[in-house]
Image (cartoon, rainbow, N blue to C red):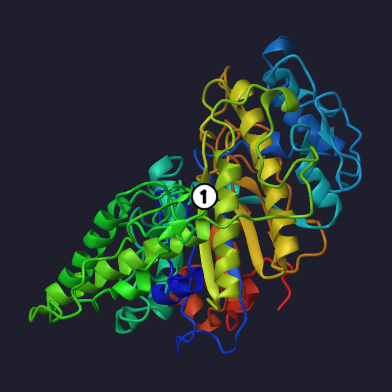
Amino acid sequence: MHSRRSFLKTTGAFGLSAGCFLPILSARESPSLPAGDDYKALVCVYLHGGNDSLNMLPPAEAANYQEYFDVRGGGDNPEEGIAVSNTVFDLPDLDSQKLSSSTNPYAAEDNQSAGLKGVYETGLGLNVNGVMPEIAHLIRKQKIKILSNVGNLVEPLTKEDIASVYKEKPSYLFSHDNQRMQVDIGRADLDNGFGWAGRIADLWFGTEKYDAFPFGMNFSLRARGSRMLEGTKTRPYVVQPNPVAFNKMRLMPAGGTRWIQWDEHLNRRSMYHYLYGADAMKPGDYSYAEYNENWGFYNDVPRPLDLTGRTKEVSPNFLKRVYQKMGMNALRTNDAVLAALGEELSFDQKNSYNEDLFSVPEEETLGLTMNNFGRFIQNLETIAKMMKVGASEGYRRQIFLVQHGGFDTHGSQLEVHPRILRELSLGMEHFSSALEELGLSEKVVTYTTSDFGRTVSSNGDGTDHGWGGNQMIMGGGINQSEIIGKLPSLAIGGADDYSKQGRIIPSIANIQVQAELAHWFGVDKNYLPELFPHISNFQSDANDVTSSFVNLGFSS
């Protein structure tokens, strides 16, 4: 009989890629991995479309809030304003006092009113939007750091530098595709290339290790269009929540089923093994019980076509042999993924509404109109399942890319933004609690990133493409909430405005954050300049690449 553990051992490694959700299941004993037997994972939460982080984390200090309100308050027409009120909500301790439909602090007649109603104080220079009580709770518990004013940069820039021909600016500023590409590839002077995480996979799981680790490190969920996990020699593996590949070659569950076509499935699988040069399936390994108590009758025992007496079909052509190996690796990995995703996770902790972790609250409970709500939460549950497998089976490194969409809010921002922030807040809380119970809180780093921030100014129905924006990071031993970086001026035409729309010039480069993440993950510091060619522009010490780091506060 084939067990879940035996399935997992046959896969060698998992990788997930752009298009769905991206993790990396690394090799167990790859000589290029850092020494030891530790487990680490990165989870990139990509806020697709360019998040308006100013309404997610509004300014707290009076002078900064006034700059924000002067631009977004609507002026003589306050009903047209898009500024979040600085009214402070009481936030209960969500560990002991759960929310309900009648106690949501942000409760209002519609999404627009809820999203602008008020904030939670954090004791930092930024507050948290009222529709994100779980994020405020995690910050108060010292579990989340805020990165202020992050964006794509080739080198540090000031407003005076913008007009200088001697200072290099990112190419194709304010363009979705180009700015996202630069986030993915770890450099802001190009609009094409290979992903920084994919190139880590190249380093640790190159073609010379292809037989043992065919899929590299990376996994993707709902991340279409991303290059982050694509390397020069490796590609990520796309994991669907409900995989359909090889549906006609499924293995019969050990407990049986009333379906009578398992012979056809096993026969196809047996022929597949033969055509792809694998060892023949042994019928005795797939002998299921003749009598099933659930059915109450005997049935014919499903057995695969017996090809054990035939010589394996191994092609003399090298490329065909590579193709055969790829085909078998795909089948084995699919088996392992199905086994992992089929496992039910059970947690003692409850979410902020006293429901099971990764359950999706009803609209009535949340008090918001939530179109297409719940996918992000469910994708995080999938990642948690894959992490549990990776950590327990000895796969030492994983990288996951999960996309949360809807952030390109040129129009209908006040309707759309509150609901996607609400799901982001719930998902991050579920995930944090799950990792805690799985014993992975210090071994996993989860962080947000986006195409860019959005303009301080309103276009009348939303906001337009900006530059710098605020991001969040948790895990990896972080035990103190703080703002990393300088809070910019939000005045139109002010010291940090690219022009006169409130496109804020970043003070932290994405590559500074990515380089520190990669180093924590185990990449030798001497390789960081190859991953991030412009990182030296941000070093305070020319001889030490780690002097470019922003000090995220990870444990070793």
Quarter residue 231 falls in: bottom left
In the image, what residue occupies the spot 56% across and 56% down?
Answer: 383
Residue 25 image offset from top left, x and y in percent? 48, 70
Please identify the quadrant where the C terminus is shown. Answer: bottom right
Q: Secondary structure at mark 1?
A: loop
458 on left or right of 366 = left
Seen from the viewer's position, the closer of residues 124 and 337 is 337
| Outermost residue, front side | 297
For disc 1, the neighbor class at 10 Å (few under 14, some 14 to 19, many from 20) is few
Residue 127 image offset from top left, x and y in percent? 80, 40
- Figure check: 175 above or below 337: above
Seen from the viewer's position, the closer of residues 289 and 499 is 289
Q: Which residue is mark 1?
A: 294
- The kind of residue tagged 1 is Asn
Please identify the quadrant where the N terminus is shown. Answer: bottom left
Residue 397 image offset from top left, x and y in percent? 54, 73
Quarter residue 459 falls in: top right
- Residue 484 shows in this picture: no
Residue 189 image offset from top left, x and y in percent? 40, 57
In the image, what residue occupies the spot 34% across and 61% down?
Answer: 301
336 on left or right of 245 = right
In the image, what residue occupies the spot 73% across and 45% down?
Answer: 356
- Residue 426 shows in this picture: yes
475 on left or right of 534 = right
- Figure check: 88 above or below 145: above
- Figure check: 304 above or below 105: below
- Figure check: 237 above or below 541: above
